[in-house]
Amino acid sequence: MVRKLFFAVAWLGILFLSLMGIYLAIFPKYILNFNLEGIVFRGATLGVAVFYLLIFIEKFLMNFEKSKDYQVQTENGKLTVSSSSINNLVREVVLGNPDLKNIKAKNKIKGKKLYITVTVDAYSDSDIARNISDTQGRIKHEIFEYLSLEVEEVEVKVSKLLKRRGSSILAERGEE
């Protein structure tokens, strides 16, 4: 608790210093003891102050960001599952399909609904639509089976079509 209080005071200090720096850069004539009229000094002061102001705003907003952990009520209590655990499970499921490579999984929750987006590279010599559909079904099934989370939607994006080395579509059909 003391640590959080310390950081809160520090961020308020940064906010105060950044606002004062902006004020000094814009209105330097109100300070009598220093010659702050130089454009270089004013620009540097304004740059540093704006930088600290942006850091303050970013950290302030991060404190109010929703947690990416998902909580599931079980008969014995609450189960908390991290977002990275869900992404790892999705990657494992997709790795089971030899026609899909370079898996990047993301997930988000809206309300009580879980949405999963997977970006993959697919081999062009396979039935891509069937592979994607099967993979989407397996992802939904595995997440529900292992984590008891209901997946609302699984979106699979094919970012690149790959060709297998040493083979061609004509060779597989026997037309060469």
Image (cartoon, rainbow, N blue to C red):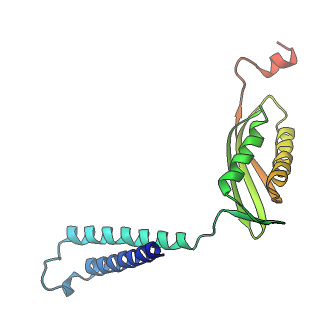
Residue 167: x and y in percent read 75, 18
What's the residue at 65%, 53% (across, down)? 84
Which image quarter: residue 42?
Answer: bottom left
Residue 146: x and y in percent read 81, 51
What count of labels does the image hold?
0
Residue 75: x and y in percent read 84, 66
Instruction: Please give left or right for residue 14 compared with residue 25 in the image.
Output: right
Residue 166: x and y in percent read 71, 17
Which image quarter: residue 68?
Answer: bottom right
Which is nearer the eye, 131 or 168? 131
Residue 167, compared with residue 51, is above or below; it is above
Instruction: Please give left or right for residue 24 compared with residue 32 in the image.
Output: right
Which image quarter: residue 160?
Answer: top right
Q: Is residue 19 visible?
A: yes
What's the residue at 39%, 78% (across, down)? 9
Which is nearer the eye, 149 or 23? 149
Q: Is residue 158 visible?
A: no
Residue 165, compared with residue 47, is above or below; it is above
